[in-house]
Image: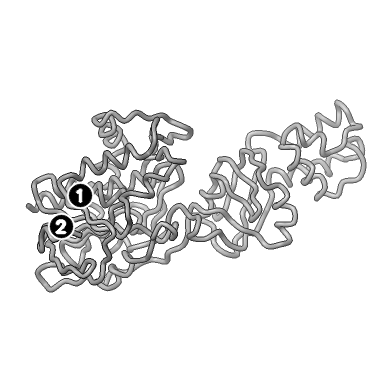
Amino acid sequence: MSAQHTHYDTIILGAGAAGLFCAKFAAAQGGSVLVVDHAKRPAEKVRISGGGRCNFTNLYAGPENFFSSNKHFAKSALARYTQWDFIDLLADHGITWHEKTLGQLFCDDKSQAIVDMLLREARGAEIALQTTVDEVAHDGTAFRLTLSGRKVTARHLVVATGGKSIPKMGATGLGYQIAEDFGLPVTETRPALVPLTFAPQELDWIAPLAGTALPARVSANGTRFDEALLFTHRGLSGPSILQISSVWREGDPITVDLLPEGDAFAALKEARGENGRRAPATALATILPAKLAATIAERANLAGNLADQSDATLRTLADRIHAMTLKPVGSEGYRTAEVTLGGVDTDALSSKTMEAKTLPNLFFIGEVVDVTGWLGGYNFQWAWASAAAAGREIATRG
């Protein structure tokens, strides 16, 4: 870390999506900005996201696509820096993109293009990588930090340290600790957008289906998602499961509809009329993946062919397809979670500026805040929007 300054207008902790984007705005009026990160390279989660193409936003991003203890908190920031603003920025840098599904936007080329753009936009800031945050305090006038042994001060402090997800990339709970040290409450945090795991008795039939995927409707606690589901050796994954993990809690069941756009009873009844000598599993394989069809038929303990099955039996079989109730025992945890649910309590922050209500010039942005988006580019849009909110406010203060 260079000894370029001992005092900065702004120090930003975290050189990820939110931190770098905030630096763009905070340094816009010439203020001195230092961005600090312990990682070897900036914006690593941006680089690896979306299979290396970065799902950088969503066409339909809005406050209804986020979970928070205050469902209204994200409205202001999202309205003042929208997905269209970010798309315009990409155009300025010649970065082309495509929509994959459900409004999810990806780079045509590698996600490194987004990282390079963020660094160019933050060129007015000093970036210190492989730098530890040893101490953070406020003396009543300025923030005092010790960074890899170097003592510096700042008028503004922005915490953009992210959450606990993907610890192998160096994720820690530093941002939450800083919030609590300054007296800000932190809501319960837990892994989100994460695969769900099951007890051995469920895995006995789930694990052999590993690799089987199909469209599904998954529901829990009054929320549902219609997206792909994937069977794994540990349990269930795929977009629909990652989505529902944000509302699922230990002890809760989930309900899975394996044929959300079809009518299993009608299909089975029609198959019985056309060829009653077929086995139920064979008929099921016309509407479901064959391996899954065989498993469902076996678990239903049906005797005989389709012709031997009454309407009531076929109805019960259809219910297994449309309303399968399962009880996960846990998730794969922060190791594979894409984000952290919960964070710095939004009641302690200004929704317009992300500034702490009890300590002027202290800001929290991005994943460290109790705002968690759906799967599909929403969390990056929150990073851009919350960073813009804080950075613009800092720039106005000179």
Please name whichever residue, 115 or 382, is drawn nearer the observer in this view of the structure. 115
Q: x%, y% of residue 99? A: 43, 30
Q: Residue at image x 38%, y 44%?
A: 47
Report helix, strand or loop for mark 2: strand
Q: Which mark is residue 23?
A: 1
Separation of disc 2 and disc 1 at Cα? 9 Å
Q: Residue at image x 30%, y 71%?
A: 180
Determine whether label 2 and label 1 are within 8 Å by CB: yes
Q: Residue at image x 26%, y 67%?
A: 133
Residue type of the residue flagged with mark 1: Ala
Q: Residues within 10 Å of mark 1 (few under 14, many from 20)?
A: many
Q: Is residue 264 left or right of residue 181?
A: right
Q: Which mark is residue 185?
A: none
Asked if 43 appears above or below 170 in the picture, the reply is above
Q: Which mark is residue 10?
A: 2
Q: x%, y% of residue 348? A: 27, 64
Total marks drawn? Answer: 2
Asked if 294 appears above or below 71 in the picture, the reply is above
Kindly tell me whether residue 309 is visible in this rendering.
yes
